[in-house]
Image (cartoon, rainbow, N blue to C red):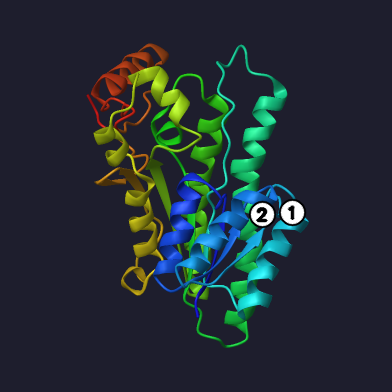
Amino acid sequence: MSAAVVTGGGRGLGRAYALTLAAAGHAVVVNDLGDSPAAEVVAEIAAAGGTAVASTHDVTDFAAAAALIALAADTFGGLDVVVANAGILRDRTLAAMSEAEWDDVIAVHLKGTFAVAHHAAAHWRARAKAGEAVDGRLITTTSASGLYGNIGQSNYAAAKAGIAGFTLVAAQELRAYGVTVNCVAPSALTRLTEAPLRRYEGEITDARRHELDPGWVARVVAWLCGPDARDVTGRVFDIRGPQVGIASGWHLEPTFTQPEDADQLGRALRAAVAAAPPAADMEGQRR
């Protein structure tokens, strides 16, 4: 039986991932802080005939992240999938943000992704070097804020942009061990996002709730964890309800050779800026 770890699996997107992966036949380690959230999802999975165990390991703690990966391997005889989903928000403008608000967000998102991925990668590398055929999946989580920017989220955007870059490197490094690494940028209605969404949109209609149901994202994650996606790696999937796009990252355009004269350099730089396409907006579009 394939074994999967889902961090932040007790609520929202993580819960949807855990339930969907369990329904697809994976044994799931549901990781979340506090006893209740993870245990409740484990009970849901068991009631539906699936297999799961709860974990309350703190992913920001390097040793605890190692214990989380060991729990999966020891309980289910191996590890095949890791979905690094755990996250928090501490939104505030740059001038008003506290050091703790910065550190907490970076720790959960960026270090939490690294810590769990590091120990999973070491597990897969050891198996591959022992001659075992590994078919592993690492799914990381970025966001529209990290890809395109959003006011009031410099901490969150920095962490999420870092995860997107991390994904590209991890995909290159882990390919040799039989592991794919992909990233999702989900837009979904969860406990974490409902309050900000209400501030921007007001009352959330049933149609909007359906459009932003975490299940849309979970379907893509489940596909990435399945056999059909065995050759897909190093990609970022921007998922907004039923709409899915591939975020293609930075492009080098235009380029020019610097002239010797400083005045000419200034003119050349201005011409390059004018010719360059505009940065994408929060919808991922160049307007």
Residue name at image x 70 percent, y 70 percent: 70
Can residue 167 be spotted in the picture? yes
Q: Amino acid at mark 1?
A: Phe
Question: Which residue appears farthest toward the bottom when viewing the image?
Answer: 131
Query: Measured from the top left, where is residue 157 in percent x and y?
Result: 50, 31
| Residue 262, percent from left and from top | 42, 14
**Residue reaching furthest front?**
47
Q: Residues within 10 Å of mark 2 (few under 14, many from 20)?
A: many
Q: Work out whether residue 256 or residue 26 is closer to the camera in this orientation and state it.
A: 26
Q: Is residue 124 left or right of 241 when viewed as pictured?
A: right
168 lies above or below 226? above
Q: Are marks 2 and 1 in contact (CB under 8 Å)?
A: yes
The residue where tag 1 is placed is: 62
Residue type pointed to by label 2? Ala
Question: Please, is residue 65 above or below residue 141 in the view?
Answer: below
Q: What residue is pinned by disc 2?
A: 115
In the image, residue 158 sits, relative to residue 29, either above or below, namely above
Say which quadrant the C terminus sits in: top left
Real-space Cα separation, disc 2 to disc 1, in angstroms: 6 Å
Q: First in sequence: mark 2 or mark 1?
A: 1
Whole-percent x, y for residue 86 in the image: 57, 46
Q: Is residue 260 visible?
A: no
